[in-house]
Amino acid sequence: MSNPAGGAASIVIAVRIVAHSMGPVSEGGQLSQNHWSIYLLLQSGGSYRLNMTTNPAPGQDEGIFETTENAYDLTRSCVRYWDFDAVSGLTVAHVLGLIAQKGRQRYRMTGSGVGCRHWVYVQVPKANCVYMLNGV
């Protein structure tokens, strides 16, 4: 789990769930692959992405948890998003600490490398009940 300099102390004002397009399944095809991520929208502008991705190593089904600090709040690959207000005073460090404390950075993907949407889906109700969201 990376932790960009200065980002951990940033105040989170909202949590954005994003469905991304990853391009067509086959060249010229109309069906597209998708990927899901969580973005923490920052009071100072920009965002902090929480992302679970497939481990490219052969035989590895545990996903790789990645974090990225971004200057933007909405990625160009976004197809659809949903925003939820964060509780007052929430920081990136608090969110990352709770993810680590609960072991949520460890996630087993399916044999075909699918699972990011379910990982996001599991995080939201837990976040609502534990620490993060207002009015959900």
Image (spheres, rainbow, N blue to C red):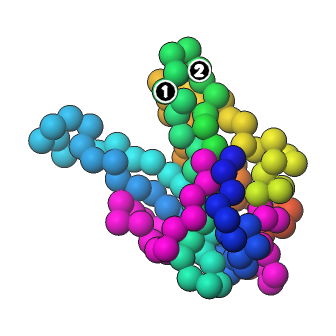
At a point 72% along the width and 43% down the height, the residue shown is 105
At a point 49% along the width and 61% down the height, the residue shown is 18
Toward the left, the furthest residue is 28
Q: Amino acid at mark 2?
A: Gln
Asked whether the beta carbons under mark 2 and mark 1 sit within 8 Å of each other, the answer is yes
Q: Could you classify mark 1 by the number of other residues whose Cα lies within 10 Å: few (under 14), some (14-19), or many (20 or more)?
A: few
Q: Hey, which quadrant is residue 7 in on the image?
A: bottom right
| Viewer-side residue, 133 vs 135 | 133
Q: Amino acid at mark 1?
A: Pro
The residue that disc 2 covers is 60
Q: Hey, which quadrant is residue 88 in on the image?
A: bottom right
x then y, percent, for residue 17: 56, 63
Q: Report the side of 77 relative to 58 (left or right).
A: left
x then y, percent, for residue 96: 76, 57
| Viewer-side residue, 45 vs 25 | 45
Position of residue 36 relative to residue 132, above or below, is above
At a point 71% along the width and 76% down the height, the residue shown is 10
Q: Report the side of 32 relative to 54 (left or right).
A: left
Toward the top, the furthest residue is 59
Residue 83 forms part of the magenta stretch: yes
At a point 60% along the width and 75% down the height, the residue shown is 41
C-alpha separation, residue under disc 2 versus residue under disc 1: 7 Å
Q: Report the side of 133 relative to 58 (left or right).
A: right
Q: Which mark is residue 125?
A: none
Q: Report the side of 38 relative to 128 (left or right).
A: left
Residue 4 forms part of the magenta stretch: no
Q: Secondary structure at mark 2?
A: loop
x then y, percent, for residue 81: 48, 67
Position of residue 16 relative to residue 45, above or below, is above
Write the start and end of the magenta stretch as one range. 66-95
The residue that disc 1 covers is 56
